[in-house]
Image (spheres, rainbow, N blue to C red):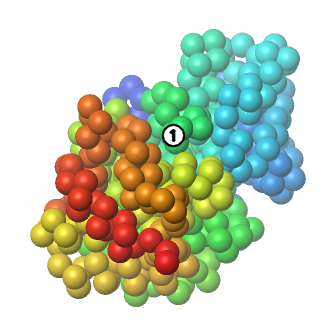
Amino acid sequence: MISLDLQTVAIDLADRSYTIAIRVSLFDNPLSYAQLPKAGAALIVTNTTVGPLYASRLERALSAQFAKVYTVQLPDGEAYKTWESLNLIFDALLGHGCDRKTVLFALGGGVVGDMTGFAAATYMRGVPFVQVPTTLLAQVDSSVGGKTAINHPLGKNMIGAFYQPLKVVCDLDTLKTLPARELSAGLAEVIKYGPIADMDFLTWLEAHLDAVLAREPAALAQVVRRSCEIKASVVAQDERESGLRAILNFGHTFGHAIEAGLGFGVWLHGEAVGCGMVLAAHLSQRLGLVDAFFVHRLVTLIAKAGLPTKAPVLDSADNAGRYLGLMRLDKKSEAGEIKFVLIDQPGCAVVRPAPDALVRQVIDLCCQK
């Protein structure tokens, strides 16, 4: 177990490099932002759930550096990751006369972080922003690496840009107020790092999951730090997902289909990814890449984390066909061919197609009866 001293993880991207800071009591400490560029104004983007808990504290911390600190609250939930919500950020920026040196602060989970980053990438063709993630999922995944986007009714994260933050501030204290369902959803993005990159980490999770679920600070610090280290290594090698970075989407091809098929927000993103990993593991086994023991081990951990392991039925007439149709809209698909992130061997992932007939078998096997 690591200590509760300040932990930092570097994202090495030449002139776009930045640091992830991890510790308790970080986000409302003015020193967390002391090295940021000087600017006349800051805009905090948050939502109606997180804002009442933390926005005023972040405002006070930022007032030590910024002459004016504004806040805009977005509606909470994946269903609001839309143009309409994005425009609320632009309305605030324009309404307050914010210039291109204004710094945006994403205070919230993955939806807030993605939309704030996309707004920063496009307002006046690019303004700086800082990620202040308040959910486990955002701290271990979505706040790191510069993916920003909004959803389209036909597909998740289909409209966006790669745009890196200046810094990521992961305050473990914010996880204390996280609902249990949200904590479990975040664990999906944690668990994925084991099969794709580090089986020792998966073994550690199996041994310490109870401590993580109990929100023991040292266990949370280890989870966030190791997850960020793995993602930082991948992003540094492939910032714009031209190859290696696609392995971070293990479980996401099936998961995004679940989200789109049910309607965004019915299942949390992490719930869909957790279930998606179950389907991807079974597909890996059917292709002869991993054995039944590996699949059982992964599914057991996913279930223990409180995540669904049975996929929903999206179409009573042709359920597998509905899944396949939605997955063909996945960003990794090429010329209508679905590319799956599969486990080539435990600790190593590969991106490759699979026969539709085999995918149908896996969907039929894993869907709720």
Q: Is residue 26 above or below residue 178?
A: above
Q: Nearer the viewer, residue 147 or 66?
A: 147
| Place of residue 85 in the rendered image (x, y in percent of width and height, measured from the top left) | 74, 33
Relative side of 247 to 300, left or right: left
Q: Position of residue 14 (x, y in %)?
A: 34, 29
Which residue is at the front of the view, 25 or 188? 188
Compared with residue 44, is residue 267 higher up or lower down, i.e. above or below?
below
Can residue 166 be seen here? The reply is: no
Q: Residues within 10 Å of mark 1 (few under 14, many from 20)?
A: many
Is the residue 138 above or below the residue 186 in the image? above
Is 194 left, or right, of 111 in this rendering? left
Could you say where residue 135 lies in the image, as x and y percent from the top left? 63, 59
Instruction: Give the quarter of the image for residue 228.
Output: bottom left
The N terminus lies in which quarter of the figure? Answer: bottom left
**Taking 363 as reference, is 183 left or right?**
right
Q: Quadrant of residue 81?
A: top right
Name the residue rendered at 83%, 31% in the picture. Answer: 70
Q: What element does badge 1 sit on?
A: strand
* Residue 131 position in % (x across, y down): 60, 42
Count how many numbered circles sit on residues in the image: 1
Residue lying at 26% horizontally and 40% vertically, measured from the top left: 337
Q: Amino acid at mark 1?
A: Gly
Q: Tell me the residue at 57%/13% (across/down).
A: 125
Q: Name the residue nearer the viewer: 88 or 6.
A: 88
